[in-house]
Amino acid sequence: MSQTARLAMVSRPHPDFSIVEQCALLKVPRSTLYYKPKPVSDDDLTLMRRIDEVYTKWPFYGSRKMVAELRGERCDVNRKRVRRLMRLMGIEAIYQKPNTSRKHPSHKIYPYLLKNLTIDRANQVWCADITYIPTWSGFLYLAVVLDVYSRRVVGWAMANHLRTELVLDALKMAIFRRRPKNVIHHSDQGCQYTSIAFGKHCEKAGIRPSMGSVGDCYDNAMCESFNATLECELLAFQRFKNQREASAAIFDFIEGWYNPHRKHSALGYLSPNNYERRMSHAA
């Protein structure tokens, strides 16, 4: 039973119980009976309606991203007000916890190349990972390659298997799109990334593989964050009949939402595409 419902019950007179006994029974402090909430202003009501519209579309938005979205619509608001109204409405952002990864014990492990590295340009460091999308007809696996500088997904591939071809297809897309020179490709120690075929392809393309420690979800945190975003902002609200339906939804998520529109606090609440565009103009 909600606190409001309990207060409503206590506020009604009962022939057999006193107010003190009712408060004790329903675990409601007596002081709350004398609290009179301030009326909500018309301006706050208008803003609450807009917050509800944004939250209905993107329930993973907290107060910071909510403010960025509203300001993008030329609505002059501050975070304290938005946070207060969100609490009053009883809404909060949905979050997903990160996962860990495991390596194949017999494959080659590449050295960690990101120590004391300052990332100040695109195509300097890529990070990569694999996640899965459940469907009614089996799992669909997604491999992604992100540019660490802008959080942009520069390469991706989907398949119904976990063979090395999956990560190779994602890497080939990234190479075709970005044409990098001496880029570092960072990943976990999954068997797809430690395979001979993957190592040869990186050598041929002039890419330097880098790997983190085993079971450390924070070492490849950016890709783990993308996987959590995918889970939180898409998979938590949709169920797919088959892999073809899931593939179409993932394509729309990456190319129609994440890259062009999804705001990142680390990028000054810009999307990956807009961040790269702004920084290229500044240079």
Image: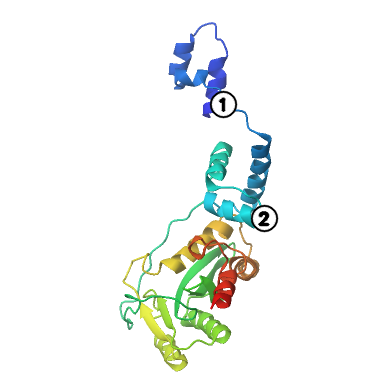
Query: What residue would you read off at disc 2?
Result: 73
Circle 2: element type: loop
Percent x, y for residue 18? 48, 8
- Mark number, residue 37: 1
Asked whether residue 160 is in view, the answer is no
Q: What residue type is labelled 2?
A: Glu
Q: Name the outermost residue toward the top.
A: 15
Circle 1: element type: loop
Q: Do the residues labelled 1 and 2 touch (CB within 8 Å)?
A: no
User: Considering only vertical position in the picture, is 273 above or below 21?
Assistant: below
CA neighbours of label 1 inside 10 A, class few (<14), some (14 to 19), many (20+): few
Q: Nearer the viewer, residue 159 or 281?
A: 281
Percent x, y for residue 41? 65, 33
Q: Residue at x 46, y 75 (%)?
A: 128
Q: Which amino acid does label 1 sit on?
A: Pro
Q: Residue at x 64, y 62 (%)?
A: 241
Disc on the earlier residue, 1 or 2: 1
User: Considering only vertical position in the picture, is 147 above or below 196?
Assistant: above
Picture quadrant where residue 155 is located:
bottom right
- Mark number, residue 64: none
Q: Name the outermost residue toward the bottom.
A: 204
CA neighbours of label 2 inside 10 A, class few (<14), some (14 to 19), many (20+): few
Q: Which residue is drawn at 53% across and 17% down?
A: 10
Q: Which of 195 and 2 is in front in this view?
A: 2
Asked whether residue 111 is in view, the answer is yes
Please state the total of marks drawn on the protein image. 2
User: Considering only vertical position in the picture, is 53 above or below 263?
Assistant: above
Percent x, y for residue 235? 57, 59
